[in-house]
Amino acid sequence: IEQRPLNSFQGQKKYALPLLKNLDSSDVLQQPNLCKMSESSQHSSLKDFLAGTMGGFAAKLLDYPLDTVKTLLQVNSATAQGAAASSAEGSGAVVYRGAWHCLQHTVENNGIRGLYKGISSPLLGSMAENAVLFWMYAHCKRWIAFASGGVDPIVASKTADQDDDDNMSLLQLSLAGAGAGFGAAFVLTPVELVKCRLQVQNSLSSGFRAYRGPMDVIVQTVKTEGIARGLYRGHASTLLREIPGNFVWYGTYEGVCKMMTPVDGTKADLGPSAHMLGGAAAGVGYWTAFYPADTVKSKIQTNPDHAGKGFIETFNVVLRQEGMRGLYRGWGITAARAAPAHAAIFAVYEYSLKLMS
């Protein structure tokens, strides 16, 4: 560059001069690679998106039946005290004594298909959620690294195929997970509202009329309740679950991976067993972080008695009527299903990334 006079850029100087400004010679020498860096960034983002999609697909097929049981337990349970329980029994509603009773009753009355009622929406939702989640996680990691004095996130994406998680602290990775959870909540809220209403309509105690399918839920909800107060009912609860949940989710997974990484090795050296162990631990941690938020969300989205109520009001009602046990109802079966499902998410995600690389 120093040996070329400036007039040699004649005809191109309107493009060349901005690139030369505030750059040293080594930066200028790298300018021809800017387009490649942008292309690499797009490819890296696409890989995260596609790998997350595959992970979400695998996980939802595994955990949906137990997710149905969890939702029915949260909405209809023998431990719901006072007038609510008396009213439910008086109307001939099904009041579940526990997870096994709920599972048995659902299969006896609706068959195995009853456990997969409404899976099309959450299956697509799980794929979209995990695609957005892992895509945002990758971007949040780069921005946090940049804010901490690291490489510019656009430049960092040039080497995104290389695993730079080893250079970030566990706190930084957990914060990136919290940021990803914030973004994913905007995809999750309407998807979970559709899922919960289709699951709960199997119960006699549901005040909602039967829906023909996911699209019917969306159409009826938008028509009668709108978008903000309808499809996004319970969004605050989703945010309160997703932000701390994903802080713990990614923090636990990355922590297990760091512990299992061999001396002088990197995360890329780990095999599927490490990814599955980390994913299983992360799944249990995610649902333990703030499970009551999910209970409140389910009630707000499916129970007409809680229509128009906020998170705090509904939380206090459940706490007063059912106690802490009511807020954590269904946690056991949720943690049990989370272990294999989330092990599948991370194992499939990491394997998909390796295939695409």
Image: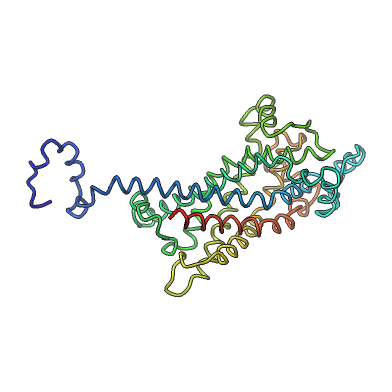
**Does residue 336 lie above or below 21 as drawn?**
below
Task: Identify which residue, 334 or 356, lies in the foreground.
Answer: 356
Quarter assignment of residue 151 = bottom left
Question: What quarter of the picture does the C terminus occupy?
Answer: bottom left
Task: Identify which residue, 59 or 189, lies in the foreground.
Answer: 59
**Does residue 155 lie above or below 167 as drawn?**
above
Quarter assignment of residue 298 = top right
Residue 51: % across, % down? 51, 51
Residue 308 lies left or right of residue 263; in this view the side is right
Residue 12: % across, % down? 15, 37
- Residue located at (85% from left, 41% from top): 84
- Residue located at (43% from left, 62% from top): 168
Q: Residue furthest top?
A: 223
Residue 59: % across, % down? 63, 52
Q: Residue furthest front?
A: 355
Residue 95 lies left or right of residue 333; in this view the side is right
Residue 267: % across, % down? 47, 65
- Residue located at (71% from left, 54% from top): 334
